[in-house]
Image: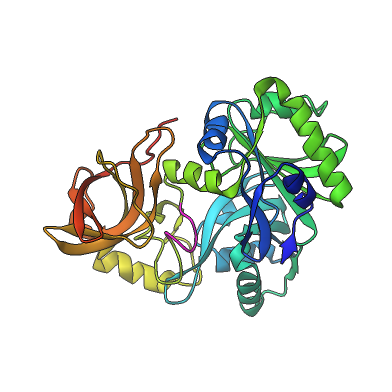
Amino acid sequence: MKRTTFNNVHKNLGAKLVEFAGFEMPIQYSSIIAEHKAVRNSVGVFDVSHMGEVFVKGEKALDFVQHITVNDASKLFAGRVQYSAMCYEEGGIVDDLLVYRIADDEFMLVINASNIEKDFAWMQKNNKFGVELKNESDEYSLLAVQGPNSLKTLQKLTDTQINLEYYHFTKLNLAGIDMIFSRTGYTGELGYELYFKGNEKVAEDLWSKIFEAGKEFDIQPVGLAARDSLRLEMGFCLYGNDIDQTTNPLEAGLGWITKLSKQSFIGKDVLVKVKENGLKRKLVAITSDEKTFPRHGYDLSVNTNKIGAVTSGTVSPMLEKPIAMGYVETQFAEIGSEINFLIRGKEVPAKVVKLPFVKR
C-alpha cells in the first residue's frame, strides 16, 4: 500500500485511515459532518496526493490532448485549466480529468487515483503524435485548501498577490515552496489546489504553516468521506460511481464539456450517433423529504417498476435531507418528476431536482 508524504501527519492527528485506490488515506479525522461544515463555512484542508499527474510535452502536445479528450483544449492558454473527459471508441468514459496548459507545447493532465495505471497505458497506446508522456504521479504531492476563508489563509504565506479566477493557475512560491497553484477544487467553494514536489519534511512543513495561517479561521483537516459529501451536494460526478466505461458523457450530463463540433477525438463518431438517436437514460439529481439514506446501487422505481438506479447518495449535512444522483429512463428525467427510492422492497417517495443541491 502506498503512503502519501502526509501519512505521519494523518496518524498524529488520529485520522481513521483506510485503503483507497492503493493508498492509505484518511477517511475522517473528527466527525464527517463537522469537517464538511468547516469547508462550507470557513476552511478545510484535504490531502489528495493520491491523484495522478501526467505531463504531455512536444510540438504536437495540443494535437494529442485534442485527440484523447472530449473538450476543446485549443481554447486554453498557459495558465488556464479545463474540466474534460477521455472516452473509449465505443463512447464509454475512460476517466474524467483536469487539463492544465503549462505552455504552448506542454500540458499537465490530472487523473483519478484509481485509474492512474489504466489511463497512462491508454494514453501511451493512443500516442500517435510522438509526444513525450511522463507519469509523475509519485513525485507530486497535492493539497486542496477549500472554503470561504481559503484565500485569506493562503495569502499570508506568499508575498505574491493571489488574484486567480476560477479554473486558472499560476506558478507560485508559497511558504517557501515552488508549486503549481490552482484555483480549482471538488467542493463548490472558493478553493485552491497546491501541486508540489518534495519529501515528507517539505510536506509536513507546508501543512503546519497552512494550519498556523488558518488558525484564526478554525481551519480543519478534512478526510475523503466529507470530500465525497461536499462534491455530491454540488452534483459533481465521481468516477466509478456516476461515470465509468459503461456510461457516456452525454447521458452523464457532461454534454457541456463534450465538443462534438471538434474535428475529431476518440469516441466522437459514436457520441454523434448517440445524440442523433436520443438518450435512453440520463443522470439526474434526486432528493426526498423522507428519513432515508440512499446508497449506491439502490433501485429507482415508479409504480414498483424499476426505472433506474442510484449511483451516489448520502444525507446532505447542509440540507439535512437525503440527496442522490442516479440514472433514470429519459421520460422520468424531467425536473419535478416524482419517483421512488426502492429500499428493501419498499418505495420511498423522492423527486428529480435541479443541481446543485446546495446553492452557493
User: Which of these two is toward me, 347 or 167?
Assistant: 347
In the rendered image, the vertical position of residue 40 relative to residue 96, given as above or below? above
The residue depicted at 77 percent of the width and 62 percent of the height is 138
User: Which of these two is toward me, 198 or 109?
Assistant: 198
The residue depicted at 43 percent of the width and 71 percent of the height is 92
Image position, residue 139 (x, y; %): 80, 59
Image position, residue 177 (x, y; %): 85, 41
Q: Quadrant of the C terminus?
A: top left
User: Which of these two is toward me, 63 or 69?
Assistant: 69
Tell me: 70 left or right of 190: left
Q: How is the image coloured?
A: rainbow
In the rendered image, the vertical position of residue 330 relative to residue 207, given as above or below? below
User: Which of these two is toward me, 222 or 141?
Assistant: 222
Of all residues shown, which one is farthest toward the top? 216
Magenta span: 237-242
**Occupied quadrant, residue 332:** bottom left
Tell me: 255 left or right of 153: left
The residue depicted at 60 percent of the width and 65 percent of the height is 114
The residue depicted at 23 percent of the width and 44 percent of the height is 335
**Occupied quadrant, residue 34:** top right
Q: Quadrant of the N terminus?
A: bottom right
Image position, residue 319 (x, y; %): 37, 33
State whether residue 270 appears in this view: yes
Image position, residue 199 (x, y; %): 87, 52
Of all residues shown, which one is farthest toward the front? 14
